[in-house]
């Protein structure tokens, strides 16, 4: 058999042919489009160790094969590896990749997650940040697929990282990052030089920012409830996407966008407002499994304006804790990304509870600060409690007489109402006063309901058996999950529910009337409410359960003190009897009510005569 022989002239000819192709490739194809197309192919084949990519020249149908095994091609056609650049200060450690010039890792140095591990905001490709635009020749360019050349300097104590993408000797695209010595605010800018002949300014030029929020808390559901996409528009207006369901929104005049992750935040502040911004929030966790890694996926598309057909945009990028005391020190009102509560409730939190709690926690532990704040709140509301209990004591004293009136005029509802109102007036009692504490406590209750989930100072702070006051406490793990309750037993909600039960019995017992037809059974509601609160609080911040337990215990003690040391029911009874002998003085409202009752009674008499 004849052996196959290699002809040396064929080898020389093949090498010359390849050299000619490379010469043609370098001098005829715009480098920006070449690398963009090449990166599109390499990204699709990331799972393959080696693949051949075919790129067509702009002017003809000639194809050139390039080996792209686990590497990218720079603009000198050299095989290079992706470079990782580390920039850090006292608070942040950031890693950038030359591939796309992207931030690929963000570590908050002074914090840990719920497992006690280092806390990352960006890691394992959970973020994509890129510019998308078209060239005049019609090619779509995504900067995340370009290979940049890094340059790191320290200027005046500020680390300055420049990511260069050189199209040619006089054409380039530059991403610049500046990180000061401390703090969580990063300066970021996008600039281009000599690119006006390449960029198609008539087409949309967008900044795309996608982030999968890394789970940071024990409860996926609880963290998801307080993780929201916020944005500011029209100067100082803020809006948010729903935290409970998938949602999207399009808005004009947007100045910043916030990707809230409960106690942590990523905020992009634009140098000037943009129109046509698009936002999307998607809930991606499926269960309360301890293996869930992410809670939400946020996406934004922000239009970029060119200056004389060149990139020239600057912005600030906050990556850090969602702490009001930190955020309020930055400009652009980014602290508005924290939800204080609606209207009056937000005002109470912003100007009362946040300053008060911030003062207390400087001198006491987080748990003691919650207790002291509760004591101060109850003392401030004690006058209302006193007036309420006095009214309840009066109602208790005249209860036998009310029962007698109900029996006497059981067949005449109008007359019964008239006599009952007269008795209330002479006794100085008002059954409506029993509702006043609930009405006055409602703003306080809801304000605190909004306060405890966003009080960053509570995060990770233990108290007694609770290892984290910003999350639920656990005294027992259940082998199964109960709907609306969870797979664990928390002690503080149990104590709070017991305290609510006894408080409700004390406040309702003095004025509990027999249920009327068509009216709700108050005893049933009295027993139902503590059970409802038990289920609700079991997955809520343990600091709120602690507050409600202490608050109700203090209220019970105040009521007992009023009953046994301040109010004498015998004296009240004597006073009521004396008031009965005096002429009844009615205010305008009582006179109006009396007139209406008299008219109703007259109409009833006329109907009976007919």
Image (cartoon, rainbow, N blue to C red):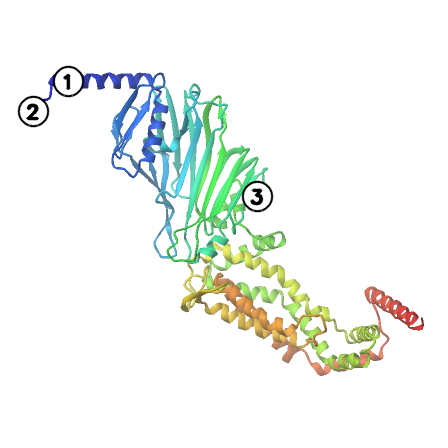
| Residue 35 seen from this side | yes
Residue 156, percent from left and from top: 37, 34
For the residues marked 3 and 1, what is the alpha-carbon distance in whole angstroms? Answer: 71 Å
Quadrant in the rendering for residue 129: top left
- Give residue 524's mark: none
Residue under label 1 = 10
Q: Residues within 10 Å of mark 3 (few under 14, many from 20)?
A: some
Q: Secondary structure at mark 1?
A: helix
Which of these two is toward me, 605 or 381? 605
Q: Badge 1: how crowded within 10 Å, few (<14), some, or many (20+)?
A: few
Q: Earlier in the sequence, mark 2 or mark 3?
A: 2
Question: Circle 2 sits on which residue?
Answer: 3
Quadrant where the N terminus is found in the figure: top left
Helix, strand or loop status at disc 3: strand
Q: Position of residue 52 (x, y in %)?
A: 27, 29
Of residue 206 and residue 264, the one placed in the foreground of this image is: 206
User: Residue lying farthest right?
Assistant: 609
Q: Which mark is residue 238?
A: 3
- Seen in the picture, residue 171 relative to 367 is either above or below; the reply is above
Residue at mark 2 to residue at mark 3: CA–CA distance? 80 Å
The Cα atoms of the two marked residues, 2 and 1, are separated by 17 Å
Q: Residue at x 53, y 73 (%)?
A: 498
The answer to whether one can see residue 364 in this image is: no
- Nearer the N terminus, badge 2 or badge 1? 2
Q: Nearer the viewer, mark 2 or mark 1?
A: 2
Instruction: Tell me which corner region of the image, top left, top right, bottom left or bottom right, holds residue 551.
Output: bottom right
């Amino acid at each position: 058999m004849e052996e196959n022989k290699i002809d040396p002239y064929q080898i020389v000819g093949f090498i010359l042919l390849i050299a000619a192709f490379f010469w043609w490739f370098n001098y005829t194809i715009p480098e920006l489009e070449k690398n963009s197309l090449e990166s599109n192919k390499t990204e699709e084949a990331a799972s393959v160790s080696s693949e051949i990519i075919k790129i067509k020249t702009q002017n003809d149908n000639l194809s050139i094969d390039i080996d792209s095994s686990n590497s990218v091609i720079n603009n000198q056609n050299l095989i290079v590896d992706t470079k990782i650049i580390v920039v850090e200060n006292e608070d942040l450690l950031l890693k950038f990749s030359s591939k796309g010039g992207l931030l690929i890792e963000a570590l908050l140095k002074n914090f840990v997650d719920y497992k006690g591990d280092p806390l990352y905001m960006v890691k394992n490709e959970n973020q994509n940040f890129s510019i998308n635009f078209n060239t005049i020749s019609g090619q779509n360019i995504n900067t995340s697929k370009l290979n940049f050349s890094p340059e790191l300097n320290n200027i005046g104590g500020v680390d300055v990282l420049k990511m260069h993408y050189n199209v040619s000797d006089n054409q380039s695209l530059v991403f610049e990052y500046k990180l000061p010595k401390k703090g969580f605010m990063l300066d970021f800018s996008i600039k281009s030089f000599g690119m006006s002949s390449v960029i198609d300014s008539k087409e949309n030029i967008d900044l795309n920012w996608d982030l999968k929020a890394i789970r940071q808390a024990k409860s996926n559901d609880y963290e998801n409830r307080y993780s929201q996409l916020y944005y500011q528009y029209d100067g100082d207006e803020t809006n948010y996407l729903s935290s409970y369901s998938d949602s999207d929104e399009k808005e004009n005049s947007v100045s910043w966008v916030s990707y809230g992750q409960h106690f942590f935040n990523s905020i992009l502040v634009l140098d000037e407002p943009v129109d046509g911004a698009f936002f999307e929030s998607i809930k991606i966790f499926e269960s309360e499994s301890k293996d869930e890694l992410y809670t939400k996926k946020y996406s934004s598309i922000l239009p970029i304006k060119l200056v004389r057909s060149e990139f020239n945009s600057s912005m600030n990028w906050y990556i850090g804790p969602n702490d009001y005391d930190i955020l309020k020190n930055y400009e652009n009102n980014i602290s508005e990304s924290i939800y204080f509560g609606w209207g009056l409730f937000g005002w109470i939190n912003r100007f009362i509870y946040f300053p008060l709690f911030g003062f207390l926690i400087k001198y006491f532990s987080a748990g003691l600060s919650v207790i002291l704040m509760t004591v101060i709140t109850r003392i401030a509301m004690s006058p209302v409690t006193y007036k309420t209990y006095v009214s309840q004591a009066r109602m208790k004293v005249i209860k036998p007489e009310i029962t007698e009136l109900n029996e006497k005029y059981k067949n005449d509802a109008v007359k019964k109402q008239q006599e009952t109102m007269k008795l209330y007036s002479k006794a100085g009692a008002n059954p409506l006063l029993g509702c006043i504490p609930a009405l006055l406590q409602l703003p306080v209750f809801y304000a605190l309901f909004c306060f405890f989930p966003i009080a960053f100072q509570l995060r990770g702070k233990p108290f007694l058996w609770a290892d984290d006051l910003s999350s639920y406490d656990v005294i027992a793990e259940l082998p199964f999950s109960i709907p609306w309750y969870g797979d664990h037993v928390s002690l503080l909600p149990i104590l709070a529910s017991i305290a609510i039960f006894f408080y409700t019995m004390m406040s309702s017992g003095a004025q509990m009337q027999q249920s009327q037809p068509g009216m709700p059974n108050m005893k049933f509601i009295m027993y139902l409410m503590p059970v409802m609160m038990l289920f609700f609080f079991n997955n809520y911040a343990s600091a709120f359960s602690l507050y409600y337990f202490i608050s109700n215990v203090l209220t019970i003690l105040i009521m007992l003190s009023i009953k046994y040391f301040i109010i004498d029911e015998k004296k009240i009874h004597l006073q009521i009897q004396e008031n009965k002998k005096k002429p009844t003085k009615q205010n305008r409202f009582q006179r109006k009510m009396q007139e209406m009752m008299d008219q109703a009674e007259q109409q009833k008499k006329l109907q009976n005569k007919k």
